Amino acid sequence: MRTRIKICGLTRVTDALHAARCGADAIGLVFYPPSPRHVTLEQARAIGRALPAFVTRVALFVDADPAQVGTVLAGLRPDLLQFHGDESPEYCRQFGMPYIKAGRVRAGLDLVQYAALYADAQGLLLDAFVPGQAGGTGQSFDWALIPENLPLPLILSGGLEPENVRHAVQSVHPWAVDVSSGVEISKGIKDAAKVVQFIQEVSNADR
Ligand SMILES: O=C(O)c1ccccc1NCC(=O)[C@H](O)[C@H](O)COP(=O)(O)O
């Protein structure tokens, strides 16, 4: 099986096109104003329009007002939603759109139970828990905490980079990997060479 790849936190058309040409399956656009990777609807539309077919456009929110999600749905028409905060299952379902739910891994969080709550999600993205930061932290977590019997496709994220992603894929066997900081020059600006290297390493792991 080929491990799918999502590159998250893009802010520039050029970075999105490069990622797509290198083989990224999905592009994440952050609609969370406190994030340094936040995009305006106009920026997101430019990226969305430039991307070729069969590259999934993911709109990411953190405990957003549903009206804000509605505005992005109408203006961008993303393929998939990502909820990266404390959104309830009912909140996630209200848009009638395919979605993935993020869980920030910490002691005491039962991941099987958590995934079961979001049984209609297209996947569970597991990220590091860093107090006071919602995501995109560049921190990893202990992959041994991931149970074997997760009832949703696993999207592994948190502190992945070209240097550790091959080991991550070979150890965890996720459905997909997600990266932001590990392929950046600065927050929101991707490093073209690191994107190539990251995608190459995932493909090496799949061999
Ligand atoms: O990227 C952000 O700035 C961000 C801010 C708030 C919530 C989520 C955010 N990113 C979500 C992602 O999907 C990241 O790729 C994921 O957290 C992994 O990030 P990193 O450890 O930097 O690779």
Image (cartoon, rainbow, N blue to C red):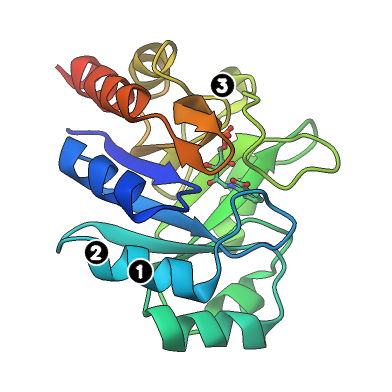
The answer to whether any part of residue 203 appears in the image is: yes
Q: Position of residue 180 (x, y in %)?
A: 50, 37
Q: Residues within 10 Å of mark 3 (few under 14, many from 20)?
A: some
Circle 3 sits in a helix, a strand or a loop, which is it? helix
**Where does label 3 land, which residue?**
143
Residue sticking out furthest to the right: 132
- Kind of residue indicated by mark 3: Trp
Asked if residue 94 shows in the view, the reply is no
Picture coordinates of residue 199 (x, y %)? Answer: 27, 27
> Which residue occupies 32% across, 67% down?
48
| Residue 178 place in picture, x, y as percent | 44, 38
The residue tagged 2 is 50
- Judged from the image, the secondary structure of the residue bearing numbered disc 1 is helix
Q: Are marks 1 and 2 in contact (CB under 8 Å)?
A: yes
138 versus 176 height, above or below: above
User: Residue 195: image x %, image y %?
Assistant: 33, 29
Residue at 40% across, 78% down: 76
Q: Looking at the picture, which amino acid does disc 1 mark?
A: Ala
What type is the residue that disc 2 sits on? Ala
Marks 3 and 2 close (CB-CB < 8 Å)? no
Distance Cα–Cα, label 1 vs label 2: 6 Å
In this rendering, is residue 1 above or below 161?
Answer: below
Q: Quadrant of ligand 1?
A: top right
